Amino acid sequence: MNTLMKRDLYVALAFLAALLVLPLFIGHSRYLLSVLMNCAGLSVVAFGVWLTFTIGRINICQAGFALIGGYTTAILLSRYGLSFWLALPLSAVVSAAIGALIGSFILKLRGIYFSMLTISLTEAIRLSFLNGGEFTQGSKGITGLPQPFAGDSPLPMYYLAVVLLALGLLVTWRVHYSRLGRIFRAMRLNEDLAESFGTNVWRYRVTAFAIACALGGVGGSYFAVFTQSVYPQSFTVEHSIYYMLFCFLGGLEFVSGAIVGAFALTILFELLSQFQQYQTLVYGVLMISVILLLPNGLMAVRSARIEGPSGRRTPSRPAPDSARAEATENPTTGSSS
Amino acid sequence: MSTAILEARNVTKRFGGLTANEDVNLVLSGAAGQVVSVIGPNGAGKSTFFKMLSGFLRPSSGSVLLHGQDITGMPPHRIARLGLVRTFQETTIFPDLTAMEHVSLAHQLHREASDLDVVLGTSRARGDEKRLSASAADILELMELSSVADVAARHLPQGLLRLLGIAMGLATRPQVLLLGEPYAGLNPEETNRAVSITRKIAASGVSVLLVEHDMKAVMAISDRVHVLYFGKKIAEGTPEEIRNDPKVIEAYLGQEDEELGL
């Protein structure tokens, strides 16, 4: 285990530990708990976006797959009276299956073309649910979903969020730090080379994307029961872009980057809520400065020093590679427009 | 009927109006473990020809057969599975991974564990890691890279990176290994070393087909040489025959004599 991986692990474990004990101190405040639940749920969704980065694709359709997960859960719960504990994994499966199907066509595209297409995909998925007629109940959405836990305490839902965060982390971690993650990286850095030693690049891309969509589906399913409702408006292009920004802010080198970014931006957003209409402006300026000043994200702040003399051949930026350089360039143009 | 290991039949590639390869025939027959070279002046279509053999380009017409099986137009990963692998000049893919980890990763085709096993870290996946590391160690030894097995790729000099690239190709356990300009840009000492290692690879039973500019190396190492000129094959024979072939000399006319090894 190298230094960077250790840092990744420590940060991830610190987050989990903090989330486990925090209710002892803030358990009295429903508001603070709900902010943390939001953060945790969004981290799960963001893991998916983060994972898509590892195959060199900027995913801006994660909100669409969260919406699919949310609607799957809502329909299974309200129409078929299924238990949430069955609906949750089924939502992941449905999102993954749809993701694999769509992905097998669109993952050939790369760079800005893939990103543009995924933006439209978020919108297309939203519109499908909006126009789903009786089945999805259009703009009224599906409301009044039963909660999985009896009683008035928010703590069970809170711990569910923590468990899902831990599961999402585990999946992403195992994928990234195993042979599979290395294959993903090989594909991103040199597709031809990866293919030359026998990698079925197409299959692995679809696999990565399906896992990413499953994580989006789990997050969407969680938010559906958390808010006891789902609307076409629940997850939109705007959200897809936030999920991408979480990853940029946290850092693409680290699995925990998705968590760091999700927590930092979500909490910041809450703090900015008193600025009302200036909220997005402040947010935008902040994002631009982060991307300009910290191109590798918060998690990489001290990387240059840790790499030490061994990093001589790759001076200022640790382990730069084409996908990352490309990835950090696109949002700069994206968020300023 | 056909005992050829690899056979290219009338392979032609056109890019719009430009014909990069025209009716190129090449037969790699007989014993495994031979070294065959494809040479030619710049722009002769050598690289295009290699890309068609390994599946990275689809021929406009003609066919490629591996052990008699038609592999024309197959994707490279399937061709690799059937035993034909191409290596690349630019080899490093992970500056931070060690030589050992690169070669172990390139054992993709010889994994027993499924992707799910890998993610779950089952005993089968761990067994793979152990087995493949052992195999990678053997390959590194053959490539004379054992001493740098645990060095991160970004610290390796160009010459060793080239060898590492070939080592990754060997990790697929190919029957035919295509080497694209393996000696380009190496200093004489590195070239000598790479040439002797290429011999060792051939001696281990792998047929080596190489595209190369370094004539001295080509003449020294090859059992047979094929010459491409403006997309067509103009000569084929032993290094001795090629050296004395008037058509070849004419094709290379105006070039440094030394380049032909005359």
Image (tube, coloured by chain):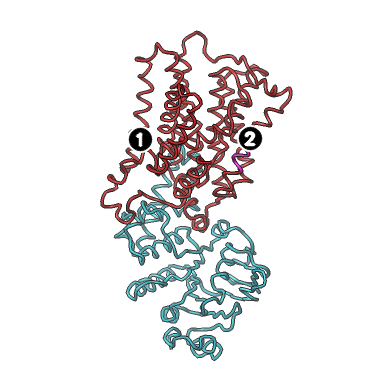
Q: Nearer the viewer, residue B142 or A43?
A: A43
Chain designation of label 1: A
Apparent side of residue B97 relative to residue B72 in the rendered image (left or right): left
Q: Amino acid at mark 1?
A: Leu
Which residue in the rendered view is the most extreme toward the right?
A133
Q: Is residue A86 above or below residue A209?
A: above
Where disc 2 sits, the SS reads helix
Q: Which chain is cyan?
A: B
Measure how far apart labels 2 and 1 are at the Cα level. 35 Å
Sequence-wise first label, 2 or 1: 1
The numbered disc on residue A332 is: none
Residue A152 included in the magenta stretch of the image:
no
Q: Where does label 2 land, which residue? A: A123
Q: Nearer the viewer, residue B223 or A320?
A: A320
Per the picture, the main secondary structure of the magenta-coloured stretch is: helix
* Residue at the (43%, 64%) spot, across then down: B166
Residue A119 included in the magenta stretch of the image:
yes
Q: Which residues are magenta?
A: A117-125
Same chain shared by disc 2 and disc 1: yes
Q: Where does label 1 land, which residue? A: A9
* Residue at the (28%, 52%) spot, across then down: A310
* Residue at the (55%, 39%) spot, across then down: A60
Where disc 1 sits, the SS reads helix
What is the x, y in percent for residue B159?
36, 67
Q: Nearer the viewer, residue B195 or A127?
A: A127
Q: Counting other residues with Cα less than 10 Å from the Cα at mark 2, is it few (<14), some (14-19), or many (20 or more)?
A: some
